[in-house]
Image (cartoon, helix red, strand yellow):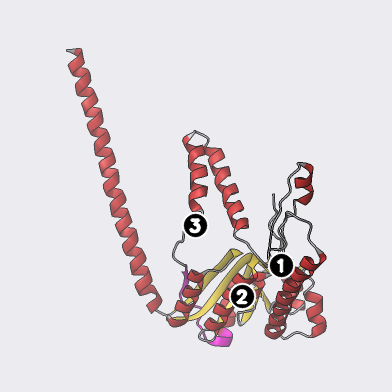
Amino acid sequence: MSLDVDQIVDRRRLRRKLTFWRTLGVLAVVAAIAAGGYASFGRDTLPSSPHVARVVIGGIIRNDRDRVKMLDDIAKSNARAVILSIDSPGGTVTGAEQVYDAIRRLADKKPVVAVVEGMAASGAYIAAIGADHIVSRRNAMVGSIGVIFQYPNVTDLLGKIGVTVEDIKSSPLKAVPNGYQPTSPEARAAINSLVVDSYGWFKGLVSERRKISDARLAEVSDGRVFTGHQGLDLQLVDEIGDERTARAWLAREKGVPESLRLRTWRTENRTSEFAWLRGMASALAAASGFDSLAALLSQATQSALDRAQLDGLLALWQAPAHN
């Protein structure tokens, strides 16, 4: 008799669990449909009404076709003006060039103001000078006008453990520097020519966009960062303030009402081609019961992936450390 009672109790527990998970599943589906409908509604209707578009430029700047498409879409939208909210140490030279070109195309259609919230250094400063006007917080950092090519060289380490990396190549400057052999003077000169060429392009943009003298350009383009307050005197920024200052400038100079609604534009969410590695590392740690280790692995793996994708010349305030 007690066995039957136990079976009945177990069945009731199982039924309650099944009901709970079925209800949860239905709610999840409803939420997903609602979120999709809201996102679709927001994309289809919000850009049709007059507004001021806000674009956030943060983190490491790389080539980003989604961001370029978004900026081009804003140019065709009913946005009256654009605010670039910048907090970035820079990134690759080609990534900075890409976003600068997209901002200049946008500025041909709409007034654009850059607001430096925390940092607009190196490649991020290239993005800022694409705007018509630069506003910076007093203690934000701007500048770092320069280019760097950085690579690890493990020749001495390999020598200590008795490893030699040999190669057969078509010419002495093919695939140099490679980090496994001492860098020859010829290879160093070849890489230096790349840095000098991109550096000259960077300085030319600053000179053109900021209308500063050669003497002032030499003063600000030695790689240093400056506070927004210093940058004002050096002609790197136009005003000290924040987003409200930018709105006031748009109203005063471009006739864009400060009462106009502000809308943040975002690109579609993208998944890195290496996201599976970060997910697998953290999932394995979490499955083993090490939640704190999972979070640490996720962060460390993402940092390593970020560094791995920064190939070539960098317009970056501080180049990533190589472990």
Gap in angstroms between the C-alphas marked 3 and 2: 23 Å
Examine the rendered structure and indicate whether residue 64 appears above or below residue 132: above
Compare residues 288 and 310 and report the one nearer the observer: 310
Examine the rendered structure and indicate whether residue 312 appears above or below residue 274: below
Residue 108 in the image, given as x and y percentages of width and height = 54, 86
At a point 33% along the width and 61% down the height, the residue shown is 36
Q: Tell me if I can see residue 242 in this picture.
A: no
Please tell me which of labels 1 and 2 falls first in the chain.
2
Q: In this view, does 190 lie to the left or right of 2?
A: right
Give the residue furthest to the top: 1
Residue 309 in the image, given as x and y percentages of width and height = 59, 60
Compare residues 287 and 323 and report the one nearer the observer: 323
Quadrant of res 218: bottom right
Q: Does the magenta stretch include residue 243?
A: no
Q: What amino acid is labelled 2 in the image?
A: Glu
Residue under label 3, please give it.
273
At a point 63% along the width and 65% down the height, the residue shown is 88
Residue under label 2, please give it.
97
Please tell me which of labels 1 and 3 falls first in the chain.
1
Closer to the observer: label 1 or label 3? 1
Residue under label 1, please give it.
171
For mark 2, give the secondary structure.
Answer: helix
For mark 1, give the secondary structure.
Answer: loop
Density class for disc 3 (Cα within 10 Å; few <14, some 14-19, many ≥20) is: few
Q: What amino acid is labelled 3 in the image?
A: Glu
Gap in angstroms between the C-alphas marked 1 and 2: 31 Å
At a point 57% along the width and 75% down the height, the residue shown is 98
Q: Tell me if I can see residue 52 in this picture.
A: yes
User: What span is in magenta?
Assistant: 252-266
Q: What amino acid is labelled 1 in the image?
A: Ser
Q: Is residue 7 left or right of residue 182?
A: left
